[in-house]
Amino acid sequence: MTHPLASVTIATLLASKPQAHNPVITFHHDQTVSAALKVLSQHHILSAPLVMTANLEDLESGMDREETIRDTLLGWIDIHDLLVALLDHMKKDGQQLPTQMLALMSALDKAQHTFMSRPLITLKSGEDKSLVYETEVDSSLLTTIQDSFLGRNGHAVHRLAVFDPHGEITAVCSQMDVIKLLARQPLLLGGKANKTLLELGLVQPGAGHSIVVVDAHLPTLQAFDQMLKVGVSGAAVVSPTGQLVANLSASDLRGIQPEHLSVLALPVAELLALRHGTTYLGYSQRDSKEAEHDFFASRRRPPADTGELSSSPHVAASAADSEVRLITATRTTTLKEITMMMAENHVHRVYITDEAMRPEAVITPTDILRQCVTP
């Protein structure tokens, strides 16, 4: 039986998404970290393609201008890459990250000038890239998921760039774009659409992504350091009794500017409380001395990744505050339901919890795509 995704093309996927930026926002190799953060903040995005700009000497040497002005895609630069580079910068020559908030704030202030002036080409950009030429956009989305988003070699990528004949990036599509298409057309999920997460084996140990838990009182940069060491982009924040109260991810740093680095020294729970204008484990917007910091005052409640607009029955109040809402699922949630939850709330991680709100597993877009294309 032919999989329903075999009749859907990349062009269909691109047509289904709004084109927020025309042309596509890109970083050039000689831009600085400071400039990159300003661009990300201005456009309220977390990543952009990194391109190598044409060599001006080549342009002056008489070479064909049409050939030499083309930029070369090097990869993507996102908040994750900038965090990795910042941590490497602060830990160079064997230095350790301070564990106390004030000492870490001082260290961040000291590192800010030299780190922010670094050209992007000197950073380790993500290999999270896949390329498609415009002539190939009629390729099957099923094949694209298998070969690009999931990768035949097991290395998944989260973004795909589309090039025109001149080498310009004309569009970018992501795993989340596919998730939104699947939510609008659930028949594309195939025969597994109404199977539960338990039936699909996604709640078994090792079946999905390992849950990483961070201490709510740990400085935020220390928490990100722990996450990056084990290769995850999000971590569960739990109460002393093990109940899920929040998720920490790079999305919580959306809009961060060069002068905002000091907020990374705040405890995780305080940063999240101020970021979302609520209360976590005793930290609140009302009582925090950092409540009027520009980073929090300008983006008190970002529209993405908060999950507060969902009509899903699996949007649950946390133990920390009756107004804090988390996107969670249970073992009996179906593949169709969890796909719709991700799409409606634009979240990349949905935790599977038990009756006491203790996290049992975490599901990502990669997990859903893998279920879609495997028997």
Image: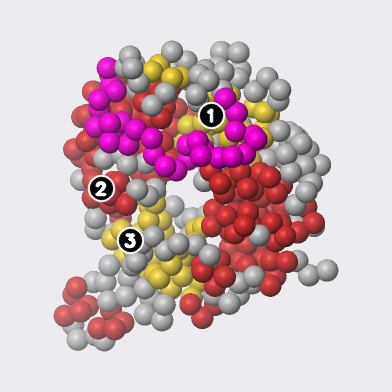
Q: What residue sits 56% from the left and 22% below the top?
A: 318
Q: Is residue 27 left or right of residue 279?
A: left
- How far separated are the C-alphas under marks 3 and 2? 13 Å
User: Pointer 1: what residue?
Assistant: 325
Magenta residues span: 289-317
Is 96 included in the stretch rendered in magenta?
no
Q: Amino acid at mark 1?
A: Arg
Pick whichever, 343 or 233, lies toward us: 343
- The answer to whether 137 appears left or right of 162 in the picture is right
Residue count near mark 2 (Cα–Cα under 10 Å), binned few <14, some 14–19, many ≥20:
some
Relative to the observer, which residue lies in front, 67 or 168?
Answer: 168
Q: Earlier in the sequence, mark 1 or mark 2?
A: 2
Q: Quadrant of residue 244?
A: top right
Question: Residue 228: x, y in percent?
Answer: 47, 36
Q: Which mark is residue 38?
A: 2
Is residue 306 positioned above or below 37 on the image? above
Whichever of callouts 3 and 2 sits on the residue coming sooner in the sequence is 3
Q: Quadrant of residue 172?
A: bottom left
Percent coordinates x, y for residue 64 in the rendering: 26, 86
Quadrant, the C terminus: bottom right
| Residue at 33% from the left image edge and 67% from the top image edge | 23
Q: Nearer the viewer, mark 1 or mark 2?
A: 1
Q: Residues within 10 Å of mark 3 (few under 14, many from 20)?
A: some
Residue 26, label in figure: 3
- Mark 3 or 1, closer to the camera: 1
Q: Earlier in the sequence, mark 3 or mark 1?
A: 3
Q: Quadrant of the N terminus?
A: bottom right
